[in-house]
Amino acid sequence: MNIKSLIILLGFLSWGAVHGCATSPPPGNMPLIPLQQANLEAVIEENEGLDVNWENAKEVRDFYRGGVQQKAKAERKYQEKNYPEAMKLYISSNEFFSKLLEYLDEDTADYNLFEGTSILFFPNLLLADNNLKMGRIFDARGRKGPAHRYWKRALSWVKRSLKFERTEWGLALQDELSQLLTPKKD
Amino acid sequence: MGKMLKWGVAFLTALFFWMQGSEGECPRSWGENIFHAYAGQTPAPDFSLRDLQGKTVSLAGLKGKVVLLNFWATWCPNCRKEGSSFNTLDNKYRSQDFSIYRIDTKESRETILKYLEKESVQVPVLLDENGKVGRLFGVWAHPTTYLIDRQGNVRYRSIGAVDWADPEPMRVIDQLLQEK
């Protein structure tokens, strides 16, 4: 092997080392993940237990778990119509997910933790759901502008999620957001 | 020109090996082999599991003791690596308010007993057959170890193999044992 060939080979291998784990394009015909399999309740249930607060989140998985746990609390406040508390918790949940997405950005219904154990992993979709509900809180207060901004953001997160995993859950959120963002005819 | 080529080869070789070691866009495995201290009070979730003899052990029943929970499996090389060092801990702290449990994830009693024939680790093993307890603690890698204080709060976590015969983990355990 001459020296030029060696340079080309090393350059190629270095490029491969950088890009070897990069996001690969999703397959053309992704199967539809049913709502019974991937849904908010199931995600929340998988992440119940030892609390993760911001100070104690050190690993990628901690940030996911922390985000889901904050969301679970936010959902309870939202159901109780305690909107100020719900908003705080949705924002906190979004902070966890945003940090996580710096490292892992693919939604999947089959995130392998270790041999024989996988979890639902939907940071993009959970961000979308948070933003949908934050928009609804603003809408309930008659603040259409911020509501629309949250819904637009939510729609972009849903689209991102659906790019990685085609879920009934995601498609339902997409429909709901599209309707909310469609100008109403008076 | 020849000198430039040599420098080029040296640079690309260094770049190649550096990139092999870096994580690029791969999922990051942060903090292997670290001992992470928990801030604030983080109550450990309670559980009940059977040991290899069929006796039920609950975390609530261990309150008042310092507890080390090690999540492991026989297929995990790093778990095998650290396994024997638990004997040193067990021998040192057996007479104190300290309990060690190795919680096996999703394996049968038979598989574990067969494995323990080859490697003699004397600390008790609990069977988390459906992985529920691991999920409650948020375990996502093996081995993962939690140190729980006398009040039942998670105080430390380590991910990856630890030499438990080393002075550092013993210092942390001593500190927890000194607390009321």
Image (cartoon, coloured by chain):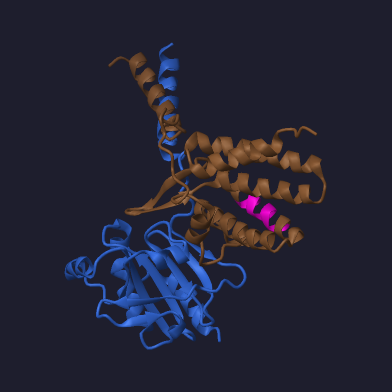
> What number of labels is visible?
0
Give the brown chain's letter. Answer: A
> Residue placed farthest to the top in the image?
B1
Quadrant placement of the C terminus of chain B: bottom right
Residue A17 visible in the displayed image: yes
Tell me which secondary structure the magenta stretch mostly adopts: helix
- Quick check: is B19 in the magenta stretch? no
Up-down: is A128 above or below B110? above
Where residue B17 sits: x, y (%)? Answer: 40, 34
Q: Residue at x 74, y 51 (%)?
A: A137
Where residue B116 sits: x, y (%)? Answer: 21, 70
Q: Residue at x 67, y 46 (%)?
A: A132
A142 or A60: nearer the eye?
A142
Give the blue chain's letter. Answer: B
Where residue B124 sits: x, y (%)? Answer: 30, 77
- Residue A65 vs residue A81: left or right? left
What stretch of residues is rendered in magenta? A88-96
A138 or B158: nearer the eye?
A138
- Quick check: is A93 in the magenta stretch? yes
Quadrant placement of the N terminus of chain B: top left
Q: Quadrant of residue B107?
A: bottom left
Where residue B56 sits: x, y (%)? Answer: 34, 81
